[in-house]
Image (tube, rainbow, N blue to C red):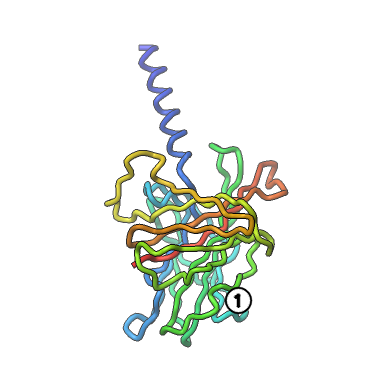
Amino acid sequence: MKRVTVSLAVAVLFAFIASSAFAHFGMLVPDTDEVTQAKRDINLVLSFSHPFEGNGMELVKPERFFVVADGEAETDLLAGLQKASVMGHTAWKAQYTPKAPGLYAFAMVPHPYKEDAENNYIQHLTKVYVDAYGEGENWMKPLGLRTEIVPLTRPFGNYAGNVFQGQVLFEGKPAAHTRVEVEFYNKDGQRKAPNDRMVTQEVMADQNGVFTFACPWKGWWGFAALTTAPEEYKGRELELGAVIWLDMK
């Protein structure tokens, strides 16, 4: 009986380690990346999850949630958030209706998440772009987040199989040789990875912070460029993630 108990405890421990090893992603996913006369409202869902495996974490109400329309000043959207559930955990949702044609960049800055499995805190600064009425331009301009991925490929209106290229910035400067994790939002669970190594793809940015990745499937893809903050947060290391989401069609 003792041997069975020990074996069960070991199995549970390995299951916990395996589940915590999957990549974390801040998620800011709209129901469209293109506003048209037939589809004028944007419904956005904010969560913190393992998008391929479908494992969620709790997301408390973010520190900031805003939109930048055509490079103008930020519009605060935090008050309009409503509580939701994603993968069985607390998430948030919002609806936004663009008032004019142009480019709409949405961004979420969450509170740092305490990750005991890694003995650190995780904060993923997450953004997504929506084109309104075919007038979305200047998508290559930074939003001014502490860390972010600036798209070098248009972040909407892409075919599956297209290459996405981005530049990682940290405090406004190129973040050389940053590791970028890439994961598919396997919302319906139809995609199966042959092994754990295939769940999360990885690519390294070059000396200018530039990386390239080809997305093979239709659907939403998340890119998380990971940096360790120079300061600690509540006595632990703080992982900063620059996250961007895009829909391949």
Give the class, few, some or many, for how many residues have Cα within 10 Å of label 1's Cα (few <14, many ≥20).
some
Q: Which amino acid does label 1 sit on?
A: Glu
Whether residue 45 is visible to the viewer of this picture, yes or no, is no
Q: Position of residue 193 (x, y in %)?
A: 33, 44
- Name of the residue lying farthest toward the right: 231
Q: Which residue is drawn at 69% across and 61% down?
A: 171
User: Can you say whether 208 is above or below 239 in the image?
Assistant: below
Quadrant in the picture for residue 221? bottom left
Q: Which residue is drawn at 35% across and 64% down?
A: 160
Secondary structure beneath disc 1?
Answer: strand
Among the 4 quarters of the image, the one containing residue 12: top left
**Residue at horizontal 43 percent and vertical 29 percent from the top:** 14
| Residue 224 in the figure: left or right of residue 171 | left
Q: In which quarter of the image is the N terminus?
A: top left
Answer left or right for 141 relative to 215.
Answer: right
Residue nearer the viewer, 88 or 72: 72
- The relative height of residue 181 versus residue 93 in the rendered view (above or below) is above
Q: Which residue is drawn at 45% across and 28% down?
A: 13
**Which residue is labeled 1 in the image?**
74
